Amino acid sequence: LFVDFPLAEGATVPLDKAQANYIGNVLRLGAGADVLVFNGREGEWHAKVIAGRRRPEELSVVARLRPQPAPGDLHYLFAPLKHARLDYMVQKAVEMGASAIRPVITRHTQVSRVNIERMRANAIEAAEQCGILTLPEIGEEQPLAAAVAALGPDRLLVFCDEAAPVADPLAALSAARRGPLAVLIGPEGGFSEEERTFLKRRDNVLVLSLGPRILRADTAAVAALALVQATLGD
Ligand code: SAM
């Protein structure tokens, strides 16, 4: 369970309504039950539920079980989709180890403003489900050019392009990789020709095909992140 609260032996952590509901009604845990908690900074802790008259009210922190691991370093840039597909893209990116999640606005992006709070809630849910202790940094939406410039020169941009020649993607990633990586996935309508030209002009770029079929953006994201993780060995 994620709690935005300092964790230490003997500390008491108040539960908000949603957390109390999750513990009491979804997990059906009562007073004295054991839960695992993390706050994204201080590792994973064992805590016990303290219940009020009607529902769980607090957690009593017992002991640290795992220290905070060193954070990964994988940036994920994507053109945000609408509603449930955006939720899915954020959840899967967290599960696949993205350390920074950056929505980018491209010519054909259909969403002009993203709801950062909703993205954060999805990231927390995904981290809780797969035991990740460090939440990714989630950025505001940015125009494509600004987001690419912000990567700096040393980060390899893995530009996923359905128009790229089909080749062995793992071999291409291994050959191109020298330092940290960023994966870029385009919108439902794909990148424009100007955007493709701009992206290919970057010095540190790998134009990557994910195979001969045009994948949905959310499918392409999972496929690309899985390939990158296979290359990184994480
Ligand atoms: N219209 C579909 C949708 O609603 O999602 C497909 C859109 S596809 C153009 C979206 C993005 O997925 C592309 O901009 C590209 O980044 C990535 N993509 C899809 N298929 C790919 C492939 N075979 N190789 C590389 N990237 C791919």
Image (cartoon, rainbow, N blue to C red):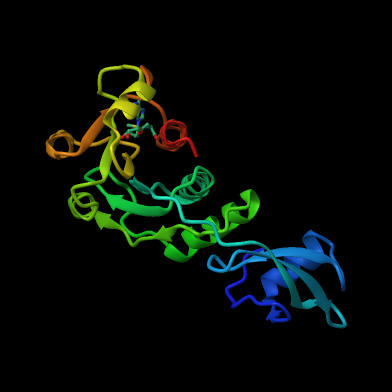
Q: Quadrant of residue 48?
A: bottom right
Is 98 on the left or on the right of 21, as rendered? left
Determine the residue positioned at 31% across, 17% down: 166
Number of dots carrying numbers: 0
Quadrant field for ligand 1: top left
Vertical arrangement, residue 187 with respect to residue 144, above or below: above
Name the spot of residue 217 as percent of width and height, x first.
Answer: 40, 36
Q: Nearer the viewer, residue 226 or 198?
A: 226
Determine the residue positioned at 25% across, 23% down: 164
Determine the residue positioned at 30% across, 42% down: 179
Vertical arrangement, residue 153 with respect to residue 119, above or below: above
Q: Nearer the viewer, residue 12 or 210?
A: 12
Is 86 on the left or on the right of 169, as rendered? right
Q: Nearer the viewer, residue 195 or 168?
A: 168
Name the spot of residue 182 as percent of width and height, x first.
Answer: 32, 44
Q: Nearer the viewer, residue 109 or 165?
A: 165
Q: Quadrant of residue 45?
A: bottom right
Vertical arrangement, residue 33 with respect to residue 176, above or below: below
Vertical arrangement, residue 204 with respect to residue 43, above or below: above
Name the spot of residue 158 as percent of width and height, x first.
Answer: 29, 36
Image quarter of the N terminus: bottom right
Name the spot of residue 27 as percent of width and height, x first.
Answer: 80, 59
